[in-house]
């Protein structure tokens, strides 16, 4: 079985990293000046970077390393039976916190500040 983080494999992280690097390279090439500046309407630096990222992405999507069919061996599966109850409790506590926060704001920010009396002799 492949190693997963947050329910997705390493390929998703590789594709994400490729597109983040591609985005940053495209931004740098578009803002570049001098000889690396794109000429005319054709951006000579951005197009190859984008095509390279697209090729890497298509290669990872269409030729996965691990098989998509599950193996005959079944791992022990841990089931959280209180999953829904925890999220209902979390939602209830979040709503109560937001209500308390918004009820506190008028009392805190709209509290009148009275002017102090000046001393007159």
Image (tube, rainbow, N blue to C red):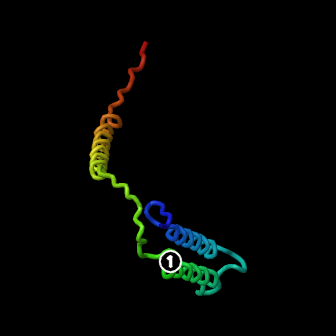
Please, is residue 112 above or below residue 82 in the view? Answer: above
Q: Is residue 65 left or right of residue 108?
A: right
Q: Residue at x 43, y 63 (%)?
A: 7
Q: For numbered disc 1, what is the local secondary structure?
A: loop
Percent position (x, y) of residue 10? 52, 67
Identify the image quadrant of the C terminus: top left
Percent position (x, y) of residue 110? 32, 36
Q: Nearer the viewer, residue 19 or 71?
A: 71
The image quadrant that residue 112 belongs to is top left
- Residue pushed farthest front? 73
Q: Is residue 75 left or right of residue 100?
A: right
The image quadrant that residue 73 belongs to is bottom left
Percent position (x, y) of residue 18? 57, 72
Percent position (x, y) of residue 8? 45, 66
- Residue pushed farthest right? 35
Q: Which residue is mark 1?
A: 64
Please, is residue 38 above or below residue 85 in the view? Answer: below
- For label 1, the crowd category at 10 Å Cα-Cα, with few meaning under 14, some 14 to 19 and many 20 or more, is few
Q: Nearer the viewer, residue 9 or 35?
A: 9
Q: Nearer the viewer, residue 6 or 57?
A: 6
Q: Residue at x 47, y 76 (%)?
A: 67
Please, is residue 111 above or below residue 30 in the view? Answer: above
The image quadrant that residue 109 belongs to is top left
Q: Nearer the viewer, residue 7 or 109?
A: 7
């Amino acid at each position: 079985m492949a190693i997963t983080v947050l329910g997705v494999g390493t390929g998703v992280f590789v594709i994400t990293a490729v597109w983040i690097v591609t985005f940053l390279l495209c931004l740098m090439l578009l803002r570049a000046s001098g000889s690396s500046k794109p000429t005319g309407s054709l951006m000579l630096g951005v197009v190859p970077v984008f095509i390279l990222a697209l090729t890497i992405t298509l290669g990872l999507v269409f030729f996965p390393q691990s098989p998509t069919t599950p193996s005959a061996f079944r791992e022990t599966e841990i089931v959280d039976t209180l999953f829904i109850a925890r999220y209902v409790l979390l939602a209830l506590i979040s709503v109560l916190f937001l209500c308390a926060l918004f009820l506190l704001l008028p009392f805190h920010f709209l509290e009148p500040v009275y002017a102090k009396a000046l001393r007159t002799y």
